Amino acid sequence: MKLNRLAMVACVAGATMATNVFADTVTLNPSATNGGAGTLSASNGAFDTDKATTNFASLLRIAGSPSVGATRNFTETGFLLVESFSGAANSVSGVTEKYNVYALFTITGTGSWLAPNFFSADLSGLSVTATLWGSPGAGSVNPTTPTTANLFGITPDATDFQLGTATLNTAINGQAQIGPGNVATTTFNALLDFVPAAGTTGIGGFWQAPVPFDVDLSASATGTPLTGGNGTSWTVAGGETRITTNVTPLAKGSGSGNIIFAVNSVPEPTSLALVGLALLSLGAARRSSRKNG
């Protein structure tokens, strides 16, 4: 099966990227049987959308403590949980009221501490894997703060079924910054290759159109300072630096963001240039902030 492009941008406590250049309308069908894998909601029919808003949580583990010039291995695991689809009220789409859609991801690689509080990933050595899941029932997904015992913070149950998988195509940006008051930020941007799960495309699948399924996804999330059990925080423990974005409870996630759909499987150079410009601006703003701080 031909791989389709999936552009994923996860920005925790960072700036929102200019990813809407990829946006286009797709048709989703929660009442589809997905080749016998399962039905998300028998009472909600097909609807059109170009974007979904999400909750976000992750656990970033960087080997060792911060040390300028040191090269470290890292692993980030987390999930994105869809809160709503644009262009369709939840009563129409059924998401969160009748079912849930979420993505689990893992990012691994190496990077360097460029400053006592600034970690940058080596983009040439990254590995990214992600799985998109459908979960029948409004209360069937209950994320908790990711821990070393449960790195995703969420575990699919027996009724959940895969909607697709993704792997890295091209990394664009990856960094983390820690600050005073136990607040931290992380940013990751990449183009991924996406493969829909068997039975989930076309008239009988969740991904009803376009056919045979040529959709790009992108996502962004913004964290907040740690307040009332929610927020993005950092600590050095167990021989590693840990940056955690919490989601407790489910409806009050620390991170929020977007999943933006598009039918252009190969982004135009202008689109990538706009994303690159946003990243450069973000980097310049942070450098200026550090100099003025």
Image (cartoon, rainbow, N blue to C red):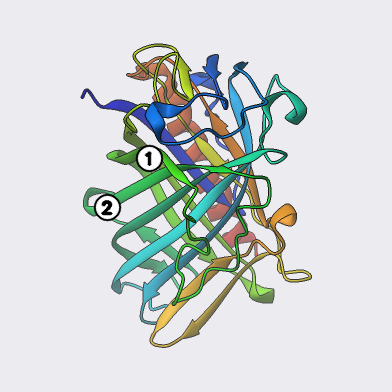
Residue beneath the point at 27% across and 52% down: 126
| Circle number at residue 43 | none
Amino acid on which disc 2 is placed: Leu
Q: Residue 88: image x %, image y %? A: 71, 21
In the depicted structure, whether residue 153 falls above or below residue 256:
below
Residue beneath the point at 69% across and 64% down: 248
Alpha carbon separation for disc pair 1 and 2: 10 Å
| Circle number at residue 190 | 1
In the depicted structure, whether residue 2 falls above or below residue 250:
above
Task: Pick the residue in front: 180 or 249.
Answer: 249
Q: Residue 243: image x %, image y %? A: 52, 69
Q: Are marks 1 and 2 in contact (CB under 8 Å)?
A: yes
User: Total number of numbered labels?
Assistant: 2
Badge 1, how many Cα within 10 Å: few under 14, some, many 20+?
many
- 1 horizontally vs 266: left or right: left
- 96 horizontally vs 167: left or right: right
Q: Quadrant of the C terminus?
A: bottom right
> Mark 1 or mark 2, which has the lower sequence index?
2
Where disc 2 sits, the SS reads loop
Q: Which image quadrant is residue 191 in?
A: top left
Residue beneath the point at 52% across and 35% down: 278
Task: Pick the residue in front: 78 or 209.
Answer: 209
Badge 2, how many Cα within 10 Å: few under 14, some, many 20+?
some
Amino acid on which disc 1 is placed: Ala
| Circle number at residue 126 | 2
Q: Which image quadrant is residue 181 in?
A: bottom right
Q: Quadrant of the N terminus?
A: top left
- 224 horizontally vs 12: left or right: right
